[in-house]
Image: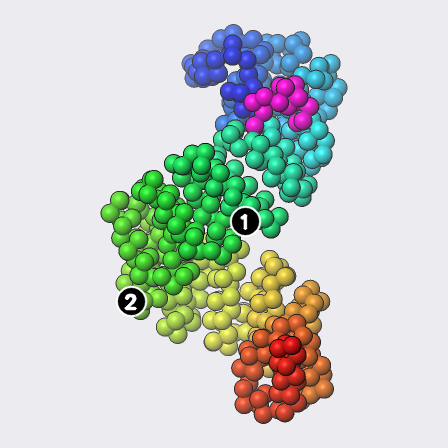
Amino acid sequence: MFDDDNFLDDDFDVKELVNRFEEMVKQHQSCYFDADELNVILEHYLQQNNIKRANQAADIAVKYHPNNPIINIIKAKQLLANSHAKEALSTLKNADLDRDDADYLLTLAACYSDLGEHEKAIKAYMKAAKEFDYKDCEDIYNFIAVEYENLGDIENALKFFILGIRGAEDIDNQYFEIRNCYSLLHKMEEGVEFFKKEIDHDPYSVPAWMALGNCYVRLGQLENAIEQFEFAVSIDPHYKKGYVDIATAYNELNRFKDTIELVDEAIRYNVESALLLCLYGEAKAKLGDTEEALKIYKKAMKMDENLPEAYAGIGFLLSDENNPQSAIKFLKHAHTLSPYNTDYMYVIIEEYNKIGEYDNALKYVNEILDLNPYDENVYISMMECYVLKDDPDKAMETLERGLLILPNNAALLYRKAFLYFAQEKNESGLLTLEMALESDYNGHIEFLSFDAENLTSNPAIMDLIEEYRIKNKK
């Protein structure tokens, strides 16, 4: 619940206490600890998420110090650690305890947090911080930030994550939370400035350089991102994630030769990573060396048999070689390992469509729909499956369903217009096409490619597009 190194009195030597306790347990001996010492030991094990040892410390405290008021706090902590937050809260509220004691307040806040009463948790955490005169409260500020995050109050979450930054146990995760807040607030430019200041504070901080690079990734500025990742790798040439993020950006930018050179450099530094090999294999495949790419993916699989990217990489290769049955086999395994990766599912859908197994394709379409009903591509994929099944009514139904979720979505409107024209419902087609042109004029280029011969030979369609071309010029 709190960082024992910051919270506890200097009189307590946490390591010495824990070592004595460990020795007692291992030797099955009896050793005296007072109630406060057992509270310290309990907190240490809670920090380590060692519930077994935490329970042992709590049981000993209750056994030897049943009348000490702190036992009620220890009991509450034990109940909380064992997922009994209601009982823990009841224990605290019914005990004769100092309601202004920081340990009491922090335990109370943790109970409220587990019960989803985030506003009450914040109030208790703030009172605890006040008891410390707001000094060395970074860990408490981080707890408050999480409560605000759970409430959807991202502005305050960001504020407290920043206040708690120097007390973060895991600076990478802290930077992730801060970066995520800036992203949710659509203030990523401010995020860039924040992490630049962090770098000014510590120019040799690999996490700060990586965080700055990831801000640029979210802004779509991959070249800038690569530059920051390169600084991180120059500070620590053995930093795997740095190489992975650079290679990912290179592949996104189609700089496949740079990826190959980068991985060769990583190998010289004995940096081994199955994921990095997959990016290497992707680069080789994109440059036409599919045989070498296959070898690299297999090597990655040997390094990590549970890495979905390795199986997906082979699946993509087999798809490109028009071997849908084998591609599906590897992609389905990748999907099993990474069930929320819709990229894999979309390729599986394409492969099933190639072999005419439209119902199997639709199973995966529906899986994506459950994951993300706001993805326009899922309605397009579903529509395509029904078109291939020669079921235009279901195809139209799908687009109408998508437009209920995504009103005025141009991609869906253009396809709805196309279906009307295919069914020779020209009036409905023109009305829908006009809505699509109003939403996104440039989308007409893709629309015409659906059936260039028939669509471009329809004067009413071409006149309407020309009307919007002139309208967009004004």
Q: Which mark is residue 289?
A: 2
Q: Position of residue 48 (x, y in %)?
A: 50, 27
Of 348 and 164, the residue lying toward us: 164
Q: Position of residue 180 (x, y in %)?
A: 56, 45
> Is there CB contact under 8 Å for labels 2 and 1?
no
Q: Position of residue 310 (x, y in %)?
A: 38, 57
Q: Quadrant of the C terminus?
A: bottom right
Of 355 and 98, the residue lying toward us: 98
Q: Which mark is residue 252?
A: none
Q: Quadrant of the N terminus?
A: top right
Q: Amino acid at mark 1?
A: Glu
Tag 2's secondary structure? loop
Q: Which mark is residue 189?
A: 1
Earlier residue among tags 2 and 1: 1
Of 452 and 353, the residue lying toward us: 452
Tag 1's secondary structure? helix
Q: Nearer the viewer, mark 2 or mark 1?
A: 1
Identify the magenta region: 125-138
Of 184 and 151, the residue lying toward us: 184
22 in the magenta segment: no
Q: Please rate how many residues cluster around mark 1, counting C-alpha atoms within 10 Å: few if below 14, some from 14 to 19, many from 20.
A: some
Residue at (26, 44) in percent of width and height: 269
Residue at (62, 72) in percent of width and height: 440
Q: Amino acid at mark 2?
A: Asp
Residue at (49, 57) in percent of width and height: 220
Using residue 83 as the reference point, say whether residue 347 is left or right of it: left
